[in-house]
Image: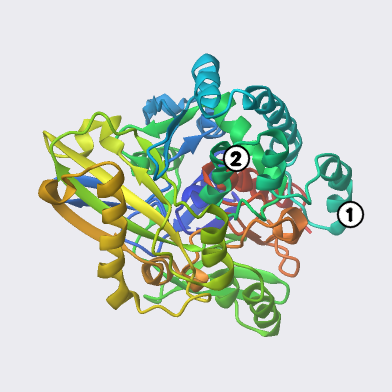
Amino acid sequence: MSSRPTSLVIGSGFGGLALAIRLQSAGIDTTIVEARDRPGGRAYVWSRDGYTFDAGPTVVTDPACLEELWALSGSQLADDVTLLPVDPFYRLIWNDGTQFDYSRDDCELKAEIAALDPADVAGYARFLAYSKAVHAEGYVKLGAVPFLDFASMLKAAPALARHQAWRSVYSVVSGFVKNEKLRQALSFHTLLVGGNPMHTSSIYALIHHLERDGGVWFAKGGTNALIRGMVALFERLGGRLLLNEPVETISHAGRRVTGLITKSGLALSADMVASNADIVGTYSMLGGDYARRKVSRLKGKRHSPSLFVVHFGLRGTLPGIAHHSILFSDRYGPLLDDIYKRGVLPADPSIYLHHPTASDPAMAPPGASTFYALAPVPHLGKASIDWATEGPRYRDVVLARVRDLLIPDLDQRLDTCFHYTPQDFSQDLGAYFGSAFSLEPTLTQSAWFRGHNRDDHFANLFLVGAGTHPGAGIPGVVGSAKATASLMLSAVANPT
């Protein structure tokens, strides 16, 4: 019988897989327990009518954080996954016809900025230097460091104060550039991790440097191809993945967890348990007074909005449409207030349009194109919407925006179409309120104020993923896995 330490990981999203790979690489026998029929969590995939539709996330940045997972066992990311560069990173489009290609090329980017306002070229250079500085402090130094006590937060406070972390991303950007469209172009990135640009801490401006430094990438075959590559690596290392096993109970005795019980009645035991599930759902699995208090506190926090996503396949190819496009509403701040504050479903949504066949034609039948159009919407706790009724109507609203701005003959080309609502996020992923990004990334819900990578009560219960430090997005959850793995390896090396 093996005397190696054992661990169980709930959920096979990016965070759960990255953690499991780190543990298995370090000699800890690890089993991932996944509720759905295939791995990936939010990075799920559908195959319909010959089209491949990724659920998301579809923007891959900082490939180095992924390459590090393969390097742990002396292999390479390229052994399992082909990453394709995306250029421009995004094409930004406004209702008045203005387009802005945001790319890595300095000369091209300066020309795009000058076309909006020549006076902002110098201001952008200053913003880029600021973004680089907050990246060094907030991501390189602190992105994979667990915050387990308030003292660790106090140590980080001088750097946060130095970079005016109490200000919002939009506020800081506005101090560097004056053109309103450029302000939107440099601040919308927080929406990709669930944050309101008008309120999310300026530290999240680091995302801009992350993209400029490491590029924006797409996994050939789709985001779920990256998930499949991670699973292949994990299983080569000897790890085990169980599918179709929703966890109902995290067993515990005293101040230690002992294992899991799934809906089918499967009982598993291990030395340690880590959860990549929704943070509210994780504590709901525990039961007992401590867990009930924890759930109550978590429910009282601010949760990120949800998403409404329309997946559609079109006959014909559209090479003039970028891989990533952002279609801005005329109401930037007021629309964000609708979503984050008022709980109003916007009639004029801003949309992220994903066009994967721009990079990989094999994601659609020959001569066809795959798309999804994503609109941020209020979560279920902000707006009482019957999505079974509202979904088909709002699908038409979203498709009309795409048709009017980019594809006039969309209706004639439409080959297949389906949509995904906040209710689906809640039912399929166990996401509290159907939130797409867990806790909202405000300053008072970041670092120590966010979910801790190790539970405060159960010494061998750990958390990973969007609800923990440092937060959502692929680099964020992969960074959380690194932080959590360090704690788990330390627990093995120093048992109490």
Mark 2 is on which residue type?
Arg
| Distance of label 1 from label 2 (alpha carbons) | 35 Å
Residue drawn where x is 30% and y is 69% of the image: 391
Compare residues 314 and 478 and report the one nearer the observer.
Answer: 314
- Asked if residue 278 shows in the view, the reply is no
Q: Residues within 10 Å of mark 1 (few under 14, many from 20)?
A: few
Nearer-N-terminus badge (1/2): 1
- Asked if residue 59 shows in the view, the reply is yes
Residue drawn where x is 69% and y is 69% of the image: 256
Mark 1 is on which residue type?
Ala
What is the basis of the colouring in this image? rainbow
Q: Which mark is residue 183?
A: 2
Mark 1 = which residue?
Answer: 151
Q: Nearer the viewer, mark 1 or mark 2?
A: 2
Check the image and report above or below for 7 versus 186. Answer: below
In the displayed orientation, state which residue is furthest to the bottom: 289
